[in-house]
Image (tube, helix red, strand yellow):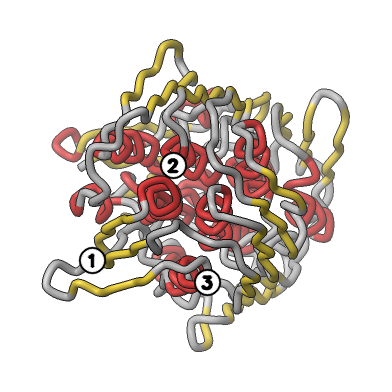
Amino acid sequence: MAKILVNNSGPLEGEVKISGAKNAVLPLMAATLLTPDTCVIDDVPDLSDVMVMRKMLESFGAVVSMSDPGKLSVNAAEITTVEGDAELVSQMRASTMAMGPLLARCGKVVMPLPGGCTIGKRPIDLHLKGFKALGATVTEDLENSSIIIEAPKGGLVGDAIYLDFPSVGATENILMAAALAKGPTILENAAKEPEIVDLANMLNKMGAKIKGAGTDTIRITGVDELSGAIHTVIPDRIECGTFMLAAAITRGKVLIRNGIPGHVRPIIAKLKECGVSVNVDEEGILVDATKGNLVATDIKTLPYPGFPTDIQSPFMAFLTTVEGTSVVRETVFENRFMHVVELNRMGADISTDNSREATIPGGKQLHGAKVRSTDLRAGAAMVLAGLVATGTTEVSEIYHIERGYEDFVGKFKSLGADLMRVEEHDV
């Protein structure tokens, strides 16, 4: 098991380029199962989750290759099985993205129950509700802990679907399934995330007829078949936000290239409330926390375009270092304060109420400690805290971090951070 050792690093300085978005590339990869033609995806980040999804596509019979770094080619001309590999599915929740494409193209999919970060129940009932609305039947195989989803004999049929919650995964799965359904589908209370827009853009390049992505009502007119396409992944807004906070927590000055300012608007707003200077121009996003005292602010996570739940834990680490008391309310996932225990090991003194609200006294001098990366974004939060803590912080279970950040250690070191990745036997 690898670890990251982090030392107090002083203000970070320099510039960093944001990679392709993890949360966009995984559904894009799944979408390649919708066509027998070759699809090429550019700016694919080098992540463990991407490797799992690649193995998943190959397990269904797709031929996947990487001709150049970041350029992924997928040809799913022959689907050899519609049964998800239980071991792969257990490693990554996004494996469920294969359900919509396989159901639409092959008429059936068998999917084991998914894995991924332990940050809440994250049920797939909304995915299944959407499939049922399109005419599919869903059967639970309790013996094998899997679900069997089958389309009617004539194929899926479009319908009006209302999501009880704007679930990103359900929106993406329904988009892909409805793309090959007969007739129109209207999806209401859909998720609005940029990753949804990116998926719709690629599907439209493949010949789908999708309108309204990025709004709460998406209209899909089913087509008989889809073709191949070439598509570039959008930049990762969560990685962008993480490096914005790295500049802020270290009182540094960092230019972030390849980020899309509109995708991180809530993060910019909250950083400005704390007194951080954030300027956007053609060069990128310049975050400057070198001047003035920084103060507390309150945060409430919400579905996009609200404050992203994926930035809640890194932002909380930052809030421990500013003047005043902050309150963070988590409304998206019910179990996303696991990092609080770890931050408190470092001297943060954060209190929580029913795992939905945290009170963060600011002005703390954190100290190094042995902490866990309890989930992907919490791992990043631990590293940010370690950058300003006295002594050495040892972050374990960093496989979570490597699921979602490309060249994490290398990018931080390029900004002057004092950290290293080591294997456990080296510690």
* Residue type of the residue flagged with mark 1: Ser
Which sits in the foreground, 254 or 257? 257
Q: Which mark is residue 30?
A: 2
Q: Nearer the viewer, mark 3 or mark 1?
A: 3
| Residue 368 shows up from this direction | no
Determine whether, in the image, residue 106 is placed left or right of residue 20.
left
Query: Which quadrant of the figure contains the N terminus?
Result: top left
Judged from the image, the secondary structure of the residue bearing numbered disc 3 is helix
Query: Which quadrant of the figure contains the C terminus?
Result: top left
Q: Residue at label 3? A: 133
What distance separates the C-alpha of mark 1 from that of mark 2?
Answer: 19 Å
Q: Residue at x 65, y 68 (%)?
A: 362
* Residue type of the residue flagged with mark 2: Ala
Q: Position of residue 306 (x, y in %)?
A: 73, 64
Q: Which mark is residue 146?
A: 1
Judged from the image, the secondary structure of the residue bearing numbered disc 2 is helix
Q: Nearer the viewer, mark 3 or mark 2?
A: 3
Is tag 3's residue or tag 1's residue first in the polypeptide sequence?
A: 3
Q: Position of residue 176 (x, y in %)?
A: 53, 50
Residue farthest top in this picture? 68
Q: Position of residue 139 (x, y in %)?
A: 28, 73
| Residue 397 shows up from this direction | yes
Residue density around tag 2, few if under 14, some if 14–19, many if 20 or more, within 10 Å:
many
Determine whether, in the image, residue 117 is placed left or right of residue 317.
left
* Residue type of the residue flagged with mark 3: Ala
Determine whether, in the image, residue 92 is placed left or right of residue 249.
left
What distance separates the C-alpha of mark 3 from that of mark 2?
Answer: 21 Å
Q: Residue at x 70, y 60 (%)?
A: 304
Is tag 1's residue or tag 2's residue first in the polypeptide sequence?
A: 2
Above-or-below relation of 249 to 228: below
Is tag 3's residue or tag 2's residue first in the polypeptide sequence?
A: 2
Q: Residue at x 39, y 54 (%)?
A: 103
